[in-house]
Image (tube, helix red, strand yellow):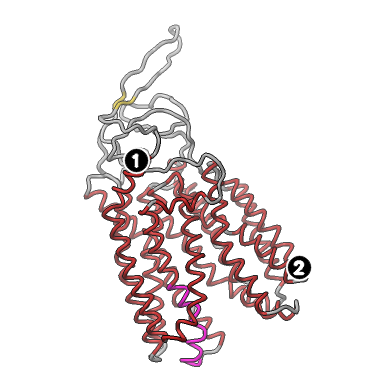
Amino acid sequence: MTYNNITEPLALNRDYIEYNKLDEEKIVIQEEIDDGSKKDSTNSISSTSNDDYELQLDDEKSLLEPASPTFIENDPKNWTDLRKRTILIIVSIAGMLSPIANTIFFPAILTVREEMHTTEPLINTVVAIFVYLMGIAPLFWASYSDLRETRRKVYLTASTMFVTSAFLCTFVTNVWWLMILRAIQAIGSSAVLCIGAGTLSDIYIPTELGTAYGLFYLGFFVGPLIGPLIGGYLTQYIHWRAIFWFLTIYGSTLLLVIYFFLPETSRPKQTSKIPLSKAQSEITLTSLPPQKSYNPLAPISLLKYPNLTLVILYKIWVTSTIYVQNILIPERFAITYGLTASQVGLVFLAPGIGLMSGSLIGGKLSDYILSKKMKKSGGDYVPELRLHSAWFGSILIPLAYFSFGWLLENGVYFVYPLITMFLGGFGTLMAFNPTSTYLVESYPTRSASVVALNNFMRALVAGSMSALAAPLSDAVGTGWTFTLMASGNVLTIFFLILVYFYGKKWREKIRKEIPK
């Protein structure tokens, strides 16, 4: 039986879409071996070619109908749309926790420093530690998740850490304890950044995954928008400790929701042989071997795979551009246009709305273009097809930020820099959605580790670039600063082009090197 239409209904089994719709499937035989009163059915499935891959099944029950596709019993990809949407909503709301927990503290920095009689470097260290641990901690969570094949345990453990530390912050009286407890909050809240993406790859097929990631990252980018607003009002009208009461309540609610409504999504791995053809089992055949022992640095070893490294380098430079922009906005807009602190805060809505719009539109567009390309290629799925939807955003990004730098440098009417910031944010998520999805789809057995590696490199490099933003702008000017960033964006587009043309070849080479 051949399935050439990628929009086959769920009843035809989502596994066939994920594993590239087997060209042939034959039900060979059912034997009756009981004493006359019972029947025991045994199925063997043959294919035109065998590439030594075992598709995992819960058991070896016979198929219901001769023409029905085989599926993994209770496979998360076969769950109902309602159940999947519920998981997506929970994970998206949980994904807001880390950025909210980070940015909600910003408006209280001066108040806390005065009340605790500490110095500016120390209070800034509290902020810096949170940011860096947001990038480092996911390595530990992802390594454990991929090794133990669990998402749920990580969610529960990390949420408990976050709630406990947030609650203790409401009683803290010195900056050192605040620093320690904020570090624990960063570790706990960061788990969703990698495990959430892994969860979505567990339950969605490729032609749905882009839209799901769009909604997931929408929640991630809403956090930085509402975090400072919540923190500012709580600090001004109640007390800065109310920030941590809010985070305690938020985290506790999430913990209860996860405990009662979020099931384990890690896919079962029992054995039943179903040979797949090489072209049709593209995703699974290029999966990396599972971890044999717990190693929190294991995700870093993934940098040896060029298709991952080049995509991550592209994303790092784009993120660095956004960090540089965010660092320069307060001073440059205040000096150039005479804006007050509250007005400068509103300026951040422009890139924020752009990011949100790009996340929503980019996800749907990514899935649509993937579907069209799969139809054109006869239904076969190759992860590199996902990159087709990244070209528009990747071209828009350098154009927008180059324009932004020189408009701001020359003091052009402030509306125009706002428009370019919106376009820059929009283009960023239009490019990030397909590239992020590509990273996960390339090596689904290590999806959490791949996302953790991406977050780690982003925090390490982009965070450091943000420290260089002001000195660089003072030395060469805002226009030339963003000319440099835009030039880097153009250069790294060629990384995506290399992955598009050679990614499949690299993944096949990796597969040959994996011991059978």
Instruction: Name the residue carrying label 1.
Output: 19
Whether the magenta-drawn stretch holds residue 322 is answered as yes
Can you name the residue that lies furthest to the top here? 35
First to last magenta residue range: 321-338
Does 432 lie within the magenta span?
Answer: no
**Type of amino acid under label 1:** Tyr
In the image, 170: left or right of 448?
right
* Residue tagged 2: 172
Question: The disc labelled 2 sits on which kind of residue?
Answer: Val
Across and down, in percent, residue 491 comes to 32, 69
Asked whether the residues under the numbered discs 1 and 2 touch, taking CB atoms below 8 Å apart as contact, a structural biologist would say: no
Helix, strand or loop at mark 1 = loop
Kindly identify the residue that appears in the image at 40 percent across and 35 percent down. 515
Judge left or right: residue 249 versus residue 508: right
Tag count: 2
Q: Residue at x 67, y 61 (%)?
A: 249
Look at 60% across and 59% down and name the residue there: 189
Q: Residues within 10 Å of mark 1 (few under 14, many from 20)?
A: many
Instruction: Locate the N terminus and report the quarter of the image it occupies.
Output: top left
Is 175 drawn above or below residue 83 in the view shown? below
Instruction: Tell me which label, 1 or 2, sits earlier in the chain.
Output: 1
User: Which residue is at a point 52% across and 75% down the rendered structure image?
Assistant: 467
Q: CA distance from mark 1 to mark 2?
A: 53 Å
The x, y position of residue 315, in whole percent, is: 41, 64
- Can you give x and y, in whole percent of width and height, for residue 241 in the image? 72, 71
- Specify whether 353 is left or right of 69: right
